Image (cartoon, rainbow, N blue to C red):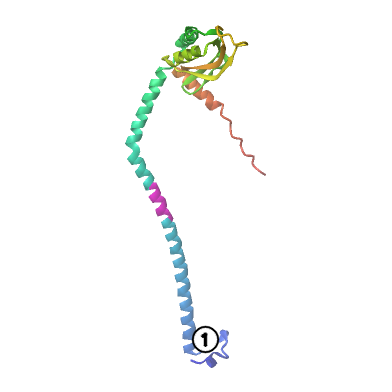
Amino acid sequence: MKMEEFKGLEPKNFGNWPIPIKGLIILILCAMAFLAGLWFDTKIQIENLTKTIEQEDELKSDFKSKQWKAATLPKLKKQLIQIESTLDEMLRKLPDKAQVDELIRDISQAVLASGLKQELFKPHSNKKEKQNIYEQLPIELKASGHYHAFGKFISGVAAMNRIVTLHNVKIKSNKKSDKEDDEHPLTLKMTAHIYRYLEAEEETETRKTKKGNKPKKKAKKNKH
């Protein structure tokens, strides 16, 4: 087939074209349609394959995570039991409402028993702070004496069967001269915190109060 045969052919008179030429044109169009269909079909398959590979990676990661959780579950259960046991033990060291006054007296007695001169012992009932399961009560304390007496007092507090924490500890010298017979050469200032176990009703009320105090999210205004 020569190029001269294509000269003078008009698209409008396609029906009158020679049969070989029409066959060639139809063959070319069919080949183009086949290749176009193959391309688009292959493209879709490539996209689906990419998605499948991504899903496979996610499923592998999810499987590994679940496998790790399943493997560590017995250990986590043991740790949970230990945590609950420790929590129960600590809660038993917290006084109830009736035992708070007794604990305050014990701390005051510890000051005197250590040989310190008590200058200030003031529980701040108005500064109580409630948490989920306990209430914290600060006690402002000021005493004077020797350094070893301070150590004896702190050791006495640490040996109590109740939890008492000491904060903002400050020690300053009272000596205006180098007299060795001064009975109270140092002054100790600190804040002791005692913790009271909340009753079930108080705990529920505290949780409700905290939920009620959470800031509400502002509603978005609709734009007209």
Residue in front for this viewpoint, 23 or 116: 116
Secondary structure at numbered mark 1: helix
Tell me what residue is drawn at x 45 percent, y 15 percent.
Answer: 155
Q: Main secondary structure of the magenta part?
A: helix
Task: Say if 73 sits above or below 26 in the image.
Answer: above
Tell me what residue is drawn at x 47 percent, y 20 percent.
Answer: 134
Span shown in magenta? 54-62
Residue 86 in which image quadrant: top left
Residue 124 drawn at (x, y percent): 56, 13
Task: Say if 66 sits above or below 89 in the image.
Answer: below
Residue 162 in which image quadrant: top left
Q: Is residue 91 magenta?
A: no
Q: Amino acid at mark 1?
A: Gly
Residue 88 drawn at (x, y percent): 38, 22
Tell me what residue is drawn at x 49 percent, y 86 percent.
Answer: 22
121 to the left or right of 196: right
Q: Quadrant of the C terminus?
A: top right
Residue 33 drawn at (x, y percent): 47, 75
In the rendered image, which residue does mark 1 sit on? 15
